[in-house]
Image: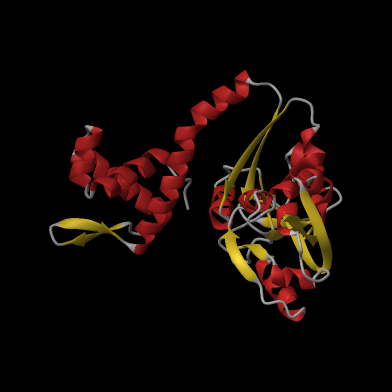
Amino acid sequence: MYPINFRHLYYFWVASKEGGIARAAERLDMAIQTVSTQVRELEHSLGHTLFRSAGRGIELTEAGTTAVRYAEQIFQLAEALPAAVREAAAEPGVRLNVGIADSLPKLAVRHLLQPAVQTPGLRLLCHESSFDDLLADLARHRLDVVLADRPAPTNPNLRVFSHRLGKASLAWYAPATLLDGREGDFPACLAHLPLLLPTTHSAVRARLDDWLARHGIRPRIVGEFEDSALLATFGESGLGAFAAPEWSFDDLPRARGLTLLGRCPEVVEHFYAILAHRKVEHPVVRKLLLPAEPS
């Protein structure tokens, strides 16, 4: 197989977007024969037909559909390249692009990033999104690392590597306004309090549900949140009691006027760093992983 000629790939990509060789030639202000020849050269280098006849026009083959998907990623990166280079040249220091899964507790994020934030000249860029979207961005090299509450799924088409960063058991917190005349000790008191829980997209939700059931607690759920920071904010405002990692103990009661109801060491939240390369090249990411182990 010959190396990919990106000019050929670009002509093919334009033809796929325009719906035909003739319209692509018009957009590119080139002869139809020239564009057609370039597309055939690409097909030859890939070893597969990318277009097939369909009525009076053409359509993508299965191989062509895959080629378009990759071409989209390639040209999106190419479009972003000049601005990224200018920005990197203008700003000395170390840049770290971190993807943060929206299910990850934000106070835990601060704890996980602590080994990196003291790096001289660090510019930290944090992007919060869904777990699947972040993995896609990581695979496209738009992120240096993803922090999440679960490892990446096993997928031969998604070459990413998970590293365990640590774990934390959960504790329950409640605003003082809800505790006047509360019934029972912990954890029985949770049966008489409104509760806020993460949605089922969070890896820890099933563990919390199981823990409540084992203690015979039928929860009165008044809110479910995908974003852990939003959950804590509503808890602080008085809407309900909620669980958070014990790492939060030094921050939540003092800073937000919340009371620690009790700990549930049986419920553990795990934290992972996910990378696009098995060998860790980024110097700041190496600090995050020490002494973490790959999983």
**Relative height, residue 29 to residue 110 (above, below):** above
Picture coordinates of residue 212 (x, y %)? 72, 74
Image quarter in which the C terminus is found: bottom right
Picture coordinates of residue 238 (x, y %)? 66, 53
Q: Residue at x 60, y 53 (%)?
A: 227
Q: Residue at x 58, y 61 (%)?
A: 223
Q: How is the image coloured?
A: secondary structure
Name the image quarter holding residue 59.
bottom left
Which residue is nearer to you in this view: 194 or 9?
194
**Relative height, residue 75 to residue 53 (above, below):** above
State whether residue 32 appears in this view: yes
Which residue is nearer to you in this view: 81 or 40?
81
State whether residue 166 appears in this view: no
Picture coordinates of residue 97 (x, y %)? 64, 39
- Taking 152 as reference, is 142 left or right? left
Name the image quarter holding residue 206.
bottom right
Given the current orientation, which residue lies at the most extreme top position?
A: 90
Q: How many marks?
A: 0
Picture coordinates of residue 28 (x, y %)? 25, 34
**Relative height, residue 72 to residue 223 (above, below):** above
Q: Residue at x 80, y 60 (%)?
A: 171
Given the current orientation, which residue lies at the most extreme left position?
A: 56
- Taking 132 as reference, is 163 left or right? right
- Taking 199 as reference, is 14 left or right? left
